[in-house]
Amino acid sequence: MIREELTKMATDTKNASQTTSCTQYLRHTKIPTLLFQNAKEVDKHVALIVEGLIRENNSAGLPTVLGLPTGSTPIGVYRELIRLHHDEDLDFSRVVTFNLDEYWPMDHNSIHSYNRWMRETFFDHVNISEGNIHIPRGDIPRQDVEAFCDDYERAIERAGGIQLQLLGIGRTGHVGFNEPGSPSNSLTRMVTLDPVTRLDASGDFFGEENVPENAITMGVGSIMSARKIIAVALGEHKAPVVRRAVEGEVTHEIAASNLQNHPNAIFAVDLAAANQLTAVATPWMVGPVDWTSQLEKRAVIWLSEQTEKPILKLELKDFLENHLHELAREFGPLEGIRHRVFQELLDGICTIPAGQDRKKIIVFSPHPDDDVISMGGTLITLADQGHDVNIAYMTSGNIAVFDHDARRHIEFMQEFQRIFNLESDKTKALNEKMLESIRQKAPGNPDIDELLEIKTLIRMTEATVAAKTAGVPAKKLHFLDLPFYRTGEVIKRPVGEEDVTIIAELLQREQPDQIYVAGDLSDPHGTHRLCAHAILRALDRIKDELNPQVWLYRGAWQDYEPHEVDMAVPLSPETMLRKKQAIFKHESQKDSALFPGHDDREFWIRAENRNKNMAQLYNLLGLPEYFGLEAFVKFSSQI
């Protein structure tokens, strides 16, 4: 799916209106499921439905009652609605809103409050009346919660009921905070949060221990009473629960599966969130398909895995018994199918990823450790083979440093200054200011600027020694510190022209022959996606003077599927050891990272297992056996 996503990014960059969208309703789903190529198209479609309802009601002088979610999923929809308000005079004065949920206990002014989040993200940017905004309160005493929840239900009724309910979906299948076990007739109430939900929220709270254990949420029954429901799912980490919600049985364990019983509910998903649905993962299972060479490759690899046979040992009966008779008939003879797929995989195994002649290379690393975690073996190989390897660290990564690590470095500086008689009133005041800010800071609150600088320095020095371990000297490192990242918070700004200019100037200055870009759709903070978009915009800006070869690599969260891989770089045991040693240099991310994502293994374990698993998979397909493999996709769209 990454190939289609990044190609669409490049197409969006060029504003190519002739591009055909892949929007379609998918087969084999129990809820109408509308597939879009990327998140941006989902956002525009959902905002268009909201806009249409508001304009229709406004023209009749009627209110529009909306149910609204929070979290990362609806941000794009809210931004598009804000644009429609400012640029196309969409009037929100008659809109009435009911938010799904709020943490409890939670002060409404807290940085973690959904009340504050909704106002900063949406309400403050449109002309909605304050009296029309309804959000569950997290600041009421426990003994008043039940009465408040009853009043919330009555307020929905007095408004005439929710006309359009927007939903996200959590990894547990929750909608709102209706965790596994929520009854289908449940109403607004206090709930205990599932451990997975609290883990997913831990990044926003800078630690799972800081996430509240309870929340107030509209119930499944409250949600199901809406006249129309649109559930939005974006990103690969949502793919397993999307499959269970729209293709599985209705169950209390997956609250979103209840939408199968709603007469007017749809799912709107991007390719990444849909990649485990039958019609996307194995389209030959649900009806005729338009066979292409890429789909042939995918089907044959799938068949090899299903039958546990190497590709060259697949027989006609394997194709006939697994819904691939059309492939055998249209692309045959069978011997040709087997050899085409096998040879393409074999040709993709590359021990000289930049070729024989010396090349100028830039590896773009969204965070200061993505280079060695994700493609450290290839980085080492490129440096050892004599290429001019540069690494561009796109963001500081400073919010991912624990306070205790920062405190340790500050206390080291204090002692260093004392030993060498370097103390001054200025250094004493600065050190104490930073230490006091740590002592006084509430969990998850932003750092003061000086402390952010210390955390930036920690990440920078770690990256420098890690790069040196991989064979790249300090003079070849570029710390871009892109402005979109400089919020001091988990939520970042959209990529702007200043970000693109910084990247374009680097490319113009260095004139690389080859670049490596993180093409990861599962990045929990979205930084990888934003960085990829910024690079593509920069390449588009300078396309008349520079057109380097572009390779995409995956982040720490997930690897490519074999049918997506264009280049697989073998890793020897010695190279794997050096890669791990480079990862170890990122001490602030070892043992327990501040943002571990959905996998609590240390990064070096994830990286080693991923590389070994890819090598093992290639071996099972009948290809040569290696100690490890790093996989890449070639970005071939003309930028």
Image: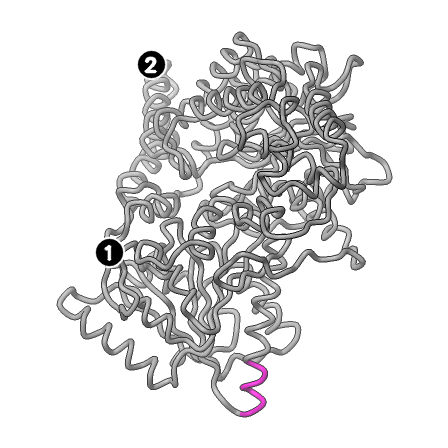
* Magenta segment includes 522: no
Please state which of residues 580 and 258 is positioned toward the viewer in this rendering.
258
Residue 543's image quarter?
Answer: top right
Helix, strand or loop for disc 1: strand
**Which of marks 2 and 1 precedes in the sequence?**
1
Helix, strand or loop for disc 2: helix
Q: Residue furthest bottom?
A: 60
In the displayed structure, would residue 79 be above or below residue 213? below
Q: Is residue 206 visible?
A: yes
Q: Which residue is mark 1?
A: 214
User: Does the magenta stretch mainly form a helix, a strand or a loop?
Assistant: helix
Give the crowd class for mark 1: few <14, some 14-19, many >=20 residues within 10 Å. some
Q: Position of residue 128 (x, y in %)?
A: 48, 77
- Picture residue at 80% right of the left edge, 58% below the top: 18
- Picture residue at 52% right of the left edge, 9% below the top: 573
In the displayed structure, would residue 181 be above or below residue 531? below
Gap in Å between the C-alphas at discs 1 and 2? Answer: 49 Å
Magenta residues? 54-60
In the displayed structure, would residue 179 be above or below residue 141? above
Residue 154's image quarter?
Answer: bottom left
Please state which of residues 451 and 248 is positioned toward the viewer in this rendering.
248
Q: Which residue is mark 2?
A: 419
Q: Quadrant of the N terminus?
A: top right
- Picture residue at 42% right of the left edge, 65% below the top: 259
Please indicate whether residue 171 sits to the left or right of residue 11 in the image.
left
Residue 110's image quarter?
Answer: bottom left
Q: Position of residue 343 (x, y in %)?
A: 73, 23
In the displayed structure, would residue 110 be above or below residue 578? below
